[in-house]
Image (cartoon, helix red, strand yellow):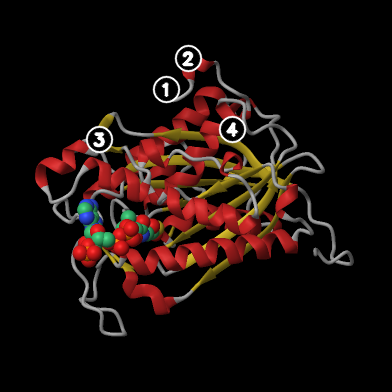
Amino acid sequence: MSDPSAPTRPPLGIVALGTYVPERVVPNSEFEARMDTTADWIESRTGIRERRYAGPDEYTSDLGVRAVRDLLSRDPDALKDVDAVICATVSPDALMPSTAALIALQVGLVGAAAFDLSTACSGFVYGLSVAQGLILSGSARRVLVVGAEALSKVVDPEDRNTAILFGDGAGAAVVGPVPAGYGFQDFVLGADGNGGGSLYLRCVAPRLPGGVEMTQAVGMNGREVFKFAVRVLGDSGTQVLAKSGLTGADVDWVVPHQANVRIIEAAMERFGLPMSKATVNVDRYGNTSSATVPLVLREAVDDGRIQDGQQLLLIAFGGGLSWVAGTMKWWGGAPSLQPRPAAEVGAWA
Ligand code: ACO
């Protein structure tokens, strides 16, 4: 339960939202042709039917910029008062400059603070919490949080354990003041480096401190990550609900990281909620790491499922291993948070 004696915080939440996925659709059948797998195996074990791949000369910053432009196309003033840019990514264009600085440059935010955040699939929701902290500490008025990934460029295309899971995409949100009664309630964040060897991407060191030798492409122990994910989504979701004085019955929508539909099903069971209360699009985009939460959020806002005043529970897990859960009352008052005409849903300029 929130501490009633704690000083009240100014309400902060998402005030603008945009997304982008690259054009190229990669159906499961493409993998059948080049590795020992079947389209049915992939769909039945993961729920994934297809994913998107960035073009040969399209990188994470490009995807992030397109997501920001999507947001600007509906709300041209959305970047006003943005003093900081956070890019959550594990497939940055470079280690330096940060992908956040590259995005800031291209969307007219030179001079704003800019940094990348590396908690893999937890990154976007972690970023919302960091953005809230920057605003509450007085360091920023509004913060642009981008989750962007070109994972197709960091997986081994021949590795059936990983290649089938991941896709490319981006989402962008502006965090800022919202009317009283709306916005972020609580966050629970965590990480456990003991599980670092279960999900990694080599950079400078050839091995992890514990001795796990890393390959150049994403390496993963799928079974370990699966067990971890089911546990931490349930635990952190339950913890954040308790922190906000809520139960599963108060939640209108669970907005989970999209890694595997079976992981989402297990989490929903833990909350005692039906799958109809979870937003799911892993079937069409696969696991886009830090981009999954904004992508699925935009979809549910666009088609009118998520509505003004509804109670959301955001949950994600990822490399680190890391986890995050957040509660928020959705504010639908800004131009890019309105439902889109059906013809425009899923379309990107
Ligand atoms: N096609 C056919 N068979 C396969 C494939 C494939 N693409 N991949 C693995 N198999 C085989 C395995 O080799 C294994 O064979 P064996 O029994 O002879 O050893 C068998 O299928 C079953 O393997 P499991 O790992 O038990 O399969 P499971 O049902 O757990 O599904 C999967 C594997 C989909 C990877 C699942 O474990 C999973 O989703 N794990 C979580 C992964 C995840 O979420 N990663 C992202 C984390 S977020 C981030 O930060 C990036």
The three-letter code of the residue at mark 4 reads Ala
Residue named by callout 4: 78
Q: Quadrant of residue 64?
A: top left
Residue at the spot of label 2:
343
Which residue is label 1 attached to?
347
Q: Is the C terminus in the top left, top right, bottom left or bottom right quadrant? A: top left
Q: Name the residue at 52% across, 16% down.
A: 342
Q: Quadrant of the N terminus?
A: bottom right
Judge depth for marks 2 and 3 and give the one in front: 3
Q: Earlier in the sequence, mark 4 or mark 1?
A: 4
Say which of 228 and 152 sits in front. 228
* Mark 3 vs 1: CB contact within 8 A: no
For the residues marked 3 and 1, what is the alpha-carbon distance in whole angstroms?
19 Å
Q: Could you tell me the amino acid type at mark 1?
A: Ala
Beta carbon of the mark 1 residue lies under 8 A of ligand 1: no
**C-alpha gap between disc 2 and disc 4:** 23 Å
Residue 138 percent across, percent down from the top left: 69, 57
Label at residue 27:
3
**Label 1 close to label 2 by CB (< 8 Å):** yes
Which of pointers 3 and 4 indicates the residue nearer the eye?
A: 3
Name the residue: 20% across, 54% down.
Answer: 160
Determine the CA span between mark 4 and mark 1. Answer: 20 Å
Q: Secondary structure at mark 1?
A: loop
* Between 95 and 164, the one nearer to me in the picture: 164
Between label 3 and label 1, give the one nearer the viewer.
3
Q: Nearer the viewer, mark 4 or mark 1?
A: 1
CB at disc 2 and ligand 1 closer than 8 Å: no
Disc 2 marks a residue whose amino acid type is Ala
